[in-house]
Image: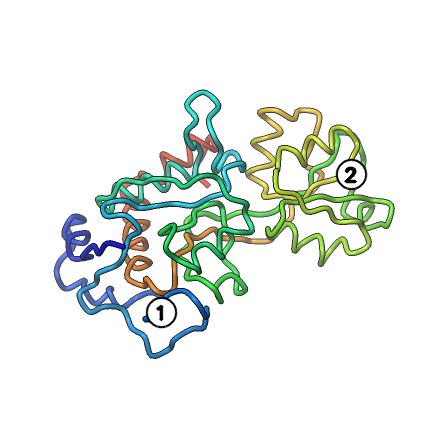
Amino acid sequence: MKNMNRRTFLEGLGLAAGTFSLAACGGNSSDSGTDSGAKDDSAAPADDGSYTLVEDGKLTVVAELGFAPFEYMDEKTGEPEGFDVDFAKALGEAMGLETTYLPNQKFDTLVPTIKQGGKADVAIAAITINDERAESIDFTDPYLDSNQSIVCRAGSGETEESLNDASKTVCCQSGTTGDEWISENLSNATKVPLDDVTAALTGIQTGSYDAMVVDLPVSQYLIKQSFSDLEVVEEIPTGEQYGVCVSKDNPNLTAALNEAIAKIKSDGTMDKIETEWFGTTL
């Protein structure tokens, strides 16, 4: 793994040298970096603000590349596309790094991959900040707000109440907050965790499933693009926020990413990315 001095990054943003007190921000690091996952409260960020990268000069990202409009594989180019992809590229540019993606991984493997270390610097995949995940990895500051939604066949007349029944089958993407919401709120229904969102929505079309619980921006986008015979029957105000996942052993990278998030929000870059993918700022 290569070292990059955060001083270079901060100078590139035009910040005064006095801002180096921010280098102490972020989570804890440890000498071992991989095996126990235990939090070492005695560890501290390097005084010089340096952080490690899997590959020198590159921000290596891992994601589940089947979650449009956030991240998906473009069929023509074979390259990742989406809101989070453009967001990751903007972060890299703000930090003076090239952004590169690993091959597609299942969503529920992303946090463990970052915790283990050595393969990716960050996971960026519409990952909701929550306490359970924060036990394993550090999160940056939030970069986008979201809610959940219930998707059914158009005209089905289904509601949250009607779906909470033993005769109903409700699917979700495995390991997501939608998965958790079904367990907590539709406990009488049969829950079916799946890896692929498109397959889940197709299953609703064919009658294999009665509903899906999924992030609202995703359901709205996919219904508009490809699933016009489905509809959002309920918006669930979960008040979620997405964050970038970073290893607890790399706290200065978290701090540098927070600087980059603040920069692209203040200079209008984030507004442009949101407008491109959602038609408006969120």
Q: Residue at x 21, y 44 (%)?
A: 96
Other-residue count near label 2 (Cα within 10 Å), few / some / many at <14 / 14–19 / ≥20 = many
* 93 vs 29: above or below: above
Q: Amino acid at mark 1?
A: Ser
Q: In which quadrant will I find the N terminus?
A: bottom left
* 8 vs 69: above or below: below
Q: Which of the two discs, 1 and 2, labels the residue nearer the N terminus?
A: 1
Question: Could you say whether the residue bearing mark 2 is in a helix, strand or loop?
Answer: loop
**Residue corresponding to mark 1:** 32
Q: Nearer the viewer, residue 22 or 88?
A: 88
Across and down, in percent, residue 172 comes to 66, 45
Across and down, in percent, residue 169 comes to 79, 44
Across and down, in percent, residue 78 comes to 43, 26
Q: Amino acid at mark 2?
A: Asp
Q: Nearer the viewer, residue 143 or 189?
A: 189
Q: Mark 1 or mark 2: which is in front?
A: 1
**Residue corresponding to mark 2:** 210
Q: Residue at x 45, y 73 (%)?
A: 38
Other-residue count near label 1 (Cα within 10 Å), few / some / many at <14 / 14–19 / ≥20 = few
Q: Please, which colouring scheme is shown?
A: rainbow
Q: Residue at x 43, y 49 (%)?
A: 123
Across and down, in percent, residue 3 comes to 22, 56
How much space separates mark 1 and mark 2, taking CA atoms?
47 Å
